[in-house]
Image (tube, grey):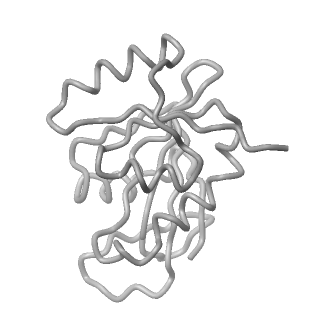
Amino acid sequence: MQLTWLAPDERIEVKKFYRQYMPYARLLQKESVCVLTQTDSTSANDVEIASSAVTCSTIVASARIRPIGQLAILTGMLVHPDFRGQGVGHQLMDELSSVINNGKTYIFALAHLEGFYSQHGFGVIADAPNDIAQLFLKYQGDSERLVLMGLTPSPQ
């Protein structure tokens, strides 16, 4: 599997991927979008991506990083249903660690995924910078309970 960061003009297939498996997700132009792909496609239901960096690969997982001033939110992490329970989410988080490992990244995790994200350095926080806290309050009105988590800086 390979991690690829997509340019804004390469996002059509990942939009289809989100529409199919996370229909409420909205990709923003300012977000960085990455996909974890596999080249040996086996299912007719798979969403394929073809770009200068990725040729006819199946999207296995995706994530987005939304900048909020000097901070960031890891959002829209999605693993294809056929690949869940196989460690793909952990692989994606490992691939992202070099990009988000700065102590300034937050996530609004679904409550049942709190343990997953804690394995990757995120901890539940009560206090967040104002911009993050305001956005969290906005999203918290949705039907599923969210947990505000922040990435703890790793020791040098």
Which x, y percent locates residue 123? Answer: 51, 39
Quarter of image, res 134: top left
Residue 16 in the image: above or below residue 152: below
Q: Residue furthest right?
A: 156
Residue 46 as seen in the image, left or right of residue 54: left
Residue 33 as seen in the image, left or right of residue 138: right
Residue 154 as seen in the image, left or right of residue 109: right
Check the picture and name the quadrant holding the C terminus.
top right
Q: Residue at x 43, y 41 (%)?
A: 75
| Number of marks present in the image shown | 0
Q: Residue at x 59, y 47 (%)?
A: 121
Which x, y percent locates residue 4? Answer: 60, 61
Residue 44 in the image: above or below residue 69: below
Which x, y percent locates residue 21? Answer: 24, 58
Residue 114 in the image: above or below residue 108: below
The front one of 88 and 40 is 88
Check the picture and name the quadrant holding the N terminus.
bottom right
Q: Residue at x 47, y 50 (%)?
A: 117
Q: Residue furthest left?
A: 143
Q: Residue at x 36, y 74 (%)?
A: 85
The front one of 23 and 120 is 120
The front one of 36 and 118 is 118
Which x, y percent locates residue 125? Answer: 48, 28
Residue 22 in the image: above or below residue 136: below
